[in-house]
Image (tube, grey):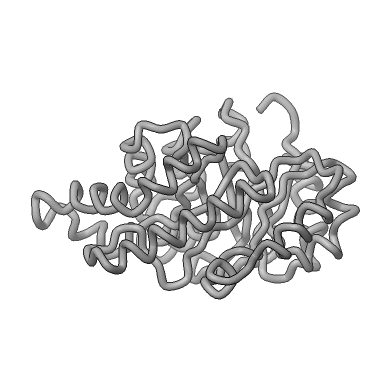
Amino acid sequence: MTSLPVLGAAMTLDDVEIHRDWLFERQRDLELQSFVDASVLNGDWTPLAARARKLLDGHRGRLGIHGPFWGLTIASADPDVRDVVSRRHVQGIEVCAAIGATQMVVHSPYTTWSYNNLDNNPSDRGKIVERCHLTLRDAVKRAEDIGCTIVIENIEDKDPYIRVGLADSFGSAAVAVSLDTGHAYYAHGSTGAPPVDYYVNAAGNRLQHVHLQDGDGYADRHWSLGEGTIQWRSVFAALTKLESNPRLIIEIKDKAKIPASAAYLASLGIAE
């Protein structure tokens, strides 16, 4: 990135109603979070999709969604569970097709336990990758067909490289890497993982999406930017080295503070 990046945000459609002017004034990237629940995906979500298209008429920022994740793992060893998880992710990609979204966020399967135990049995690393392929193959194929990218977000990942390898294993432009700054900071503060900027460097140009949230290194706070202790200058110094132009998505609990979060990073001279 050669100039200051323009920040986007993660919102529900109700939040878009409130922050539409902020979103449109700079044509900011948007991640919709109205399609994560099974009750939505199993029901008739077409009215929600129609509402999204109407609200975003004239929006020229990049559009994505957060995919389903509640109670799901993309690496289940149970084939019946995998069938459900696979179907959920295909449903998410169908939402993307309906609203013109070009990115869907999914959760990494790697846990804190994984870090210490994946090499306990020689085949365990490969088994996780194999199960992820079985789970996501239909969603990846559909994503390829519609020009959408599935980005794998770190959750408990202590190793910043492991989900990068998972994304690469698909050998598809439709699978890339996401970074959640608060999750990385939790892993750093509570499990001994590297600092947040190391996660940026580990992903390199495979990084196509970033959740920006602040925290204290103890829990998944999703505080407004500037309310925690993440070293934002180091994070953005790492981001400036990339050519992949990742979507920089403010993802905080209090959506009313989205503009203030953007203003905070602007005050540091690192984003707009």
Q: Position of residue 13 (x, y in %)?
A: 75, 64
In the rendered image, the vertical position of residue 176 relative to residue 263, given as above or below: above
Q: Position of residue 95 (x, y in %)?
A: 60, 54
Residue that appears at 52% across and 40% down: 149
Residue that appears at 42% across and 60% down: 87
Placement of the C terminus among the 4 image quadrants: top right
Q: Position of residue 126 (x, y in %)?
A: 19, 47
Most foreground residue, 271 or 70: 70
Most foreground residue, 24 or 93: 93
Q: Taking 261 as reference, is 43 left or right?
A: left
Most foreground residue, 266 or 166: 166
Question: How many numbered marks have been drawn onto this rendered protein structure?
Answer: 0
Most foreground residue, 248 or 24: 24
Residue that appears at 65% across and 67% down: 223
Placement of the N terminus among the 4 image quadrants: top right
Residue that appears at 31% across and 37% down: 169
Q: Taking 27 as reference, is 125 left or right?
A: left
In the rendered image, the vertical position of residue 103 relative to residue 193, given as above or below: above
Name of the residue lying farthest toward the bottom? 39
Q: Taking 84 as reference, is 253 left or right?
A: right
Q: Taking 103 as reference, is 173 left or right?
A: left
Q: Position of residue 252 (x, y in %)?
A: 67, 64
